Amino acid sequence: MTLLERFVKYVKVHTASEGGKYFTIPSTRCQFDLANILAEEMKALGLQDVRVSEYCYVYGHIPATPGYENAPAIGFIAHMDTAPDFSGENVNPQIIENYDGGDVVLGDSGKVLSVKNFPHLPTLKGRTLITTDGTTLLGADDKAGIAAIMTAAERIIAEGKPHGKICIGFTPDEEVGNGATKFDVEGFGAAYAYTSDGGPEFGVEFENFNAAAATFYINGFNVHPGSSKNTMVNAALLASKISSMLPEFETPRDTEQYEGFFHLTEIKGDVEKAEAHFIIRDHDRTRLEARKKTMQHIADILNEQYGEGTVELKMGDQYRNMREVIEKDMHLIEIAGKVMRDLGREPVTMPVRGGTDGASLSYMGLPCPNIGTGGYAAHGPYEHVTLEGMEFVSQLIAGIAAEYAKR
């Protein structure tokens, strides 16, 4: 099976996770469909000890070649779920060979993948570009990572070059912050690992946001609007007011690089009951805690103004910046960079304005930076990836495994 065939096969499997189910892993049963497909494919390739856990994690490994049993065991991890933000069901990818670098009409949706909105597109000229048809997301986040890892595993086994133990893992629920929650680090068996999750194929990332989620539950008091003076408490109105109480320009649209933000992801309800859902992000842990205090301060103000119990705030941390772990094992970044250069690309290290499973896994004892997949514009109808980008990542993975065998 070619890398392209793998990728198309994987994206056609519906695996969207669902937010809010913090104690249910996986959050959706459909993720088992891809997990079982991957497990069977891994067995067919010759991986050993392949298993799907009760929590929908897929594990397997390629044994070290004889004489290399003492080389560090290296893991490669990608997540199976797609974001719940936009439909990931009935994905119908468009495959454009020898892409001309210009605008792309996305099926009959009326949407256009344009150079105006995505100025990197001309750099992909001449490649095989894979897009959506405009009605769904593509799922390159993170099925491009899965396809690259599986193709690398096949290449490593077929070529027979020396390598230590290579551990392969696929996770559920990364998109809702639970990708590493039930990951069996000890059973996985790796000393170090890399996630392959989103972004240009030449990206090497070991800094990410500290992340938290916050939900305001608002209890209104609904009376006839004609006689509600000093009585009515409109829950929907308070939900919208919360956003206006936050710093105006600390949103995703107004921030970049190391700047954090508050992001209103959903607001719903009526006069009687309403909810406002936020995610909170900052690379600096102290600043993240300050942002959380701001959220609590808003809840306190509203309860003082409208009565205790009007607003209930629930907050929880999602993941932490992996930098403080990875900087103790910078060989992970150095080796990935060396292999990229050997393959003809200069690595680019940048802060991740998001998170990966590797952030949590690093704090669970498995140092785990991220390498890209060649994917762009995740979580929506403009998501796209190139075959050449995924192929580069596949070669990178095989090259990293070979480099660690020398250790």
Image: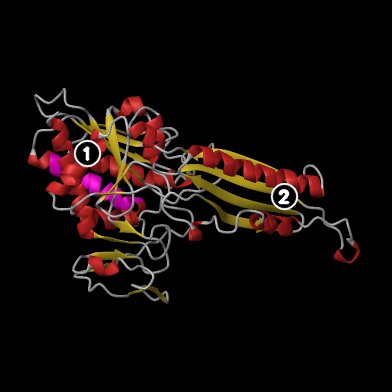
Picture quadrant of residue 321: top left
Q: Is residue 268 above or below residue 323?
A: below
Is residue 61 something one can see in this rendering? yes
* Residue depicted at 20% across the width and 65% down the height: 127
- Considering the image in quadrants, where does the C terminus appear? top left
Q: Which mark is residue 334?
A: 1
| Residue found at the very far right of the displayed protein | 227
Pick the front one: 130 or 287: 287
Q: Which mark is residue 166?
A: none
Point out residue 14 in the picture as x, y percentages from the top left corner. 40, 54
Q: Is residue 314 above or below residue 391?
A: above
Q: Which-is-in-front pick, marks 2 and 1? A: 1
The part of the chain drawn in magenta is 142-156
Q: Which amino acid lies under the numbered mark 1 shown in the image of this protein?
A: Glu
Point out residue 64 in the picture as x, y percentages from the top left corner. 15, 29
Q: Main secondary structure of the magenta part?
A: helix
Q: Is residue 367 left or right of residue 269?
A: left
Pick the front one: 160 or 1: 160
* Residue depicted at 26% across the width and 70% down the height: 122
* Structural distance between the alpha carbons of marks 2 and 1: 49 Å
Q: Which amino acid lies under the numbered mark 2 shown in the image of this protein?
A: Ile
- For disc 2, the neighbor class at 10 Å (few under 14, some 14 to 19, many from 20) is many
Q: Which residue is mark 2?
A: 218
Choose the circle earlier in sequence order: 2 or 1: 2
Picture quadrant of residue 293: top right
- For disc 1, the neighbor class at 10 Å (few under 14, some 14 to 19, many from 20) is few
